[in-house]
Image (tube, rainbow, N blue to C red):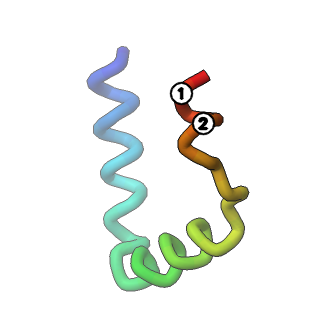
Amino acid sequence: PRYLAEFCYRFNRRFWEPQMFNRMITACLNAQTVTFSELRQ
């Protein structure tokens, strides 16, 4: 089941390849800042 889910995910994402960089930048800009001390908790 896990292998099939991974296959479906990658298969569907192949259509998004031209938009992938812009989507990644948008996700980075919208993410909340996490400090190093918060990561260590």
Residue type at mark 2? Ser
Amino acid identity at mark 1: Arg
Which residue is drawn at the image coordinates 29% and 38% (left, top)?
7
Q: Is residue 18 above or below residue 37?
A: below
Mark 1 and mark 2: Cα distance apart in space:
5 Å
Q: Is residue 10 above or below residue 14?
A: above
The N terminus: image quadrant: top left
- Quadrant in which residue 12 is drawn: bottom left
What x and y, as percent, mark residue 8?
A: 37, 41
Q: In the displayed structure, does residue 12 sit left or right of residue 28?
A: left
Residue at position x 32%, y 27% from top?
A: 4
How many numbered marks does the figure carry?
2
Is there CB contact under 8 Å for labels 1 and 2? yes
Residue drawn at x 53%, y 74% as measured from the top left? 23
Labelled disc at residue 37? 2
Instruction: Tell which residue pokes out farthest to the front in this image.
Output: 37
- The spot of residue 27 in percent (x, y) is 60, 67
Residue at mark 1? 40
Instruction: Compare residues 8 and 17 and report the one nearer the observer.
Output: 17
Q: Is the C terminus in the top left, top right, bottom left or bottom right quadrant?
A: top right
